Amino acid sequence: MLRTVWFCIWFCSNFFPNFLSWEAIAAISAVITAIFTAFAAVGVFCAFGQLRVSKKAAIFEVMKELDNEFYSDKFSELRKRTVKLNFTDPVESVECEDLLDFFEKIGSLEKEGLIPLEWIYDYWSYWILHYWVLCEKQVYKRRKETGDGTYYDNLENLFSKLAKLASQKEREAKSAIEPRMAEKEIKEYKAGLEKELEKFKKEESGN
């Protein structure tokens, strides 16, 4: 399309020199360039939007697979065994590892920016917060034995972020209990709704 337009301009300027002045050709060229630049920008914007949608869809698929794994019969049994043994001997039990491996994987995905923290909070924060507290003694013991301070460090960092977010949401929930508007503003809104009610009553009565 662009080549065709340029060919027409070139043809007219060479074979019909009196038809278009060089000033007119320059103006037309500028307009054409601006139009095609705008089309290109729109194309990039649309492609970027599609990429964002595709990325979100991919994240949802990953989270769906993780959620199915977590609520599988195998994991339900693992969670039950982990709770029983760690309440009996929280330091020596090795039953935490399979469960913590799962949460460590989620921590790694969050660290790389592949899963938003808010989504992790909505899906698994209850379990991550509780099981980390249950198993942290075992983690610290293993770090001391091996000298490896990175042992489940992604999970520990995720725990800290989720605990902070949970505290923030708890404060917000408490503030939401009381009305946020002043009494005067509330009365004004109610007065507006009373007018609305009167209007409906008149419509129903036919007046």
Image (spheres, rainbow, N blue to C red):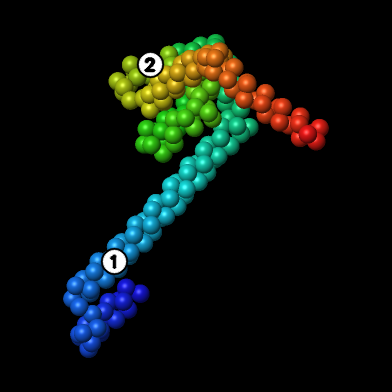
Q: Position of residue 23 (x, y in %)?
A: 19, 72
Q: Is residue 22 left or right of residue 170?
A: left
Q: Is residue 98 above or below residue 114?
A: above
Q: How many marks?
A: 2
Mark sitting on residue 75 = none
Residue most toward the top?
A: 88
Residue most toward the right?
A: 205
Q: Residue at x 38, y 36 (%)?
A: 113
In the rendered structure, which amino acid carries the disc numbered 2?
Answer: Tyr
Q: Is residue 129 above or below residue 64?
A: above
In the rendered structure, which amino acid carries the disc numbered 1?
Answer: Val
Residue most toward the bottom?
A: 15
| Residue 19 visible to an observer of this rendering | yes
194, 93: nearer the viewer: 194
Q: Is residue 125 left or right of residue 150?
A: right
Q: CA distance from mark 1 to mark 2?
A: 68 Å
| Residue 159 visible to an observer of this rendering | no
Q: Position of residue 58 (x, y in %)?
A: 48, 46
Mark sitting on residue 31 = 1
Q: Secondary structure at mark 2?
A: helix
Q: Is residue 122 above or below residue 12?
A: above
Q: Can you tell which quarter of the image residue 115 is in?
A: top left
Q: Residue at x 29, y 63 (%)?
A: 34
Q: Residue at x 47, y 30 (%)?
A: 118
Q: Nearer the viewer, mark 1 or mark 2?
A: 1
Q: Is residue 142 left or right of residue 98?
A: left
45, 18: nearer the viewer: 18
Q: Position of residue 199 (x, y in %)?
A: 71, 31
Q: Position of residue 108 (x, y in %)?
A: 39, 33
- Which residue position holds label 2? 140
